[in-house]
Image (cartoon, grey):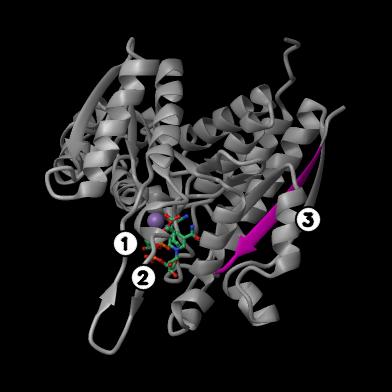
Amino acid sequence: TPHYHIVVLPGDGIGPEVTREAVRVLEAAAEAFGFRLTTETHPVGGAAIDATGDPLPEPVLQACLQADAVLLGAVGGPKWDNLDRAQRPEAGLLRLRKALEAYANLRPVQVPEALADASPLKREVVAGTDLLIVRELTGGIYFGEPRGRNGQMAWNTMRYTREEVARIARVAFEWAKRRRGRVASVDKANVLEVSQLWREVVSQVHREEFPELELEHFYVDNAAMQLVRDPRRFDVVVTGNLFGDILSDLAATLPGSLGMLPSASIGGRVGLFEPVHGSAPDIAGQGKANPLAAILSAAMLLETLGQEAAARAVRQGVDAALAEGVKTADLCRAGETPASTEAVGQFIAAYVRQQTPVAS
Ligand code: NAD
Ligand code: IPM
Ligand code: MN
């Protein structure tokens, strides 16, 4: 039987609350689907600053590099907001992504039937939405040099090389091939040189390697509007680091909550699986956080490890919880009774345990 070593980095705020449920579900999946799982938990972000002074201590990074996969909750919070940029919890996460060479951040956005009425947008606009944001994660303005500040000004650099654009474009086209064959590339090529290069390289990869697929280009401002106006027109959306960050939170309005969006950060040797949302200090410690983004991130982890049947069972468990109304407050309408973070995790773990793996 396969044996996977998973490093769990709960982080801060609701991070520990949601990762606990994701681990519960992973353990249920291992039992039901006959593989072994060893988890090893380490502090990252604010928790690691408090313990060691460093948001990504060297032994934690080494453990991640040795793992089969890394499951992360979220980092950051008001307690650490006044630290210098490089000392902040968020800097630890960015260093981790870079060290893992996790340049491709996959952020699927679906609106399950049971959530079509939880969206602030109309059911007839969002029902059936199924898109995948492919966000470049280890380049762009997040990492570009020069950067800095003096007393009078501050500056950052949005920078991409041809190779960085080509490799993320290939990831987007490969996913489009397995999906509905359409890629929307998002940039600001009417203003930025870096976006002109982006557009040129994405077009070239399309022409030379994936001519059978459909490619459209959008300016980011228009893409934001179209994502809200008619999300079903999108299949795969590929974009740079900053635009992808912003558009994915925007896209969370489609299912109605950030607590629904999972992600996988891949491309290096070890994958990093993390919800799109942050540490949600406003609801931390209250048992209210939606664990589905973390649980669906765990499903992406299982899929990446080759445990497709287990991943499918987890997703079905999520659908079953939603269909039965076992959901946290962020997904509830007036009159509905919210379930706790733990109750949602327990429901899905129990569902997964009841699945009999089908021999393939
Ligand atoms: P956030 O994503 O933490 O929260 C935004 C809003 O969404 C809040 O109202 C929050 O309550 C709600 N929300 C988020 N996740 C939820 C969930 N699972 N269930 C229910 N509601 C949920 O963003 P923010 O408030 O801008 O940032 C808070 C902190 O998190 C900051 O320090 C930020 O840097 C950090 N952050 C970390 C990550 C990460 O670790 N990957 C991502 C985003 C933000
Ligand atoms: C995310 C977060 C991070 C990002 C922050 C916390 C560094 O917002 O994962 O979307 O901007 O990438
Ligand atoms: Mn973000």
Query: Which residue is pictured at 71% across the width and 67% down the height?
Result: 58
SS state under label 1:
loop
Give the residue drawn at x 66%, y 22%: 309
Q: What element does badge 3 sit on?
A: strand
The quadrant of the image that shows the N terminus is top right
Q: Position of residue 326 (x, y in %)?
A: 51, 43
Q: Residue visible at 63% across and 67% down?
A: 44
Q: Quadrant of ligand 1?
A: bottom left
Disc 1 and disc 2 in contact, CB within 8 angstroms: yes
Q: Residues within 10 Å of mark 1 (few under 14, many from 20)?
A: some
Q: Residue 268: name its quadrant.
A: top right
The spot of residue 350 in percent (x, y) is 69, 37
Question: Looking at the picture, does residue 92 appear above or below residue 165?
Answer: below
* Magenta-drawn stretch contains 11: yes
Which residues fall within the magenta stretch? Answer: 4-12
Q: In the shown orientation, is residue 306 left or right of residue 151?
A: right
When the figure is inspected, residue 303 is found, relative to residue 40, above or below; the finding is above
Q: Mark 2: few, some, or many residues within 10 Å (few <14, many ≥20)?
A: few
Question: Image check: 203 left or right of 88?
Answer: left
Which residue position is annotated with label 1?
157
Nearest to the eye among marks 3 and 2: give it. Answer: 2
Q: Are marks 3 and 2 in contact (CB under 8 Å)?
A: no
Question: Which residue matches tag 2?
Answer: 147
Mark 3 lies on residue: 40
The percent coordinates of residue 74 (x first, y second) are 53, 60
Q: In the image, what residue type sits under mark 2?
A: Arg
As for residue 72 lying within the magenta part, the answer is no
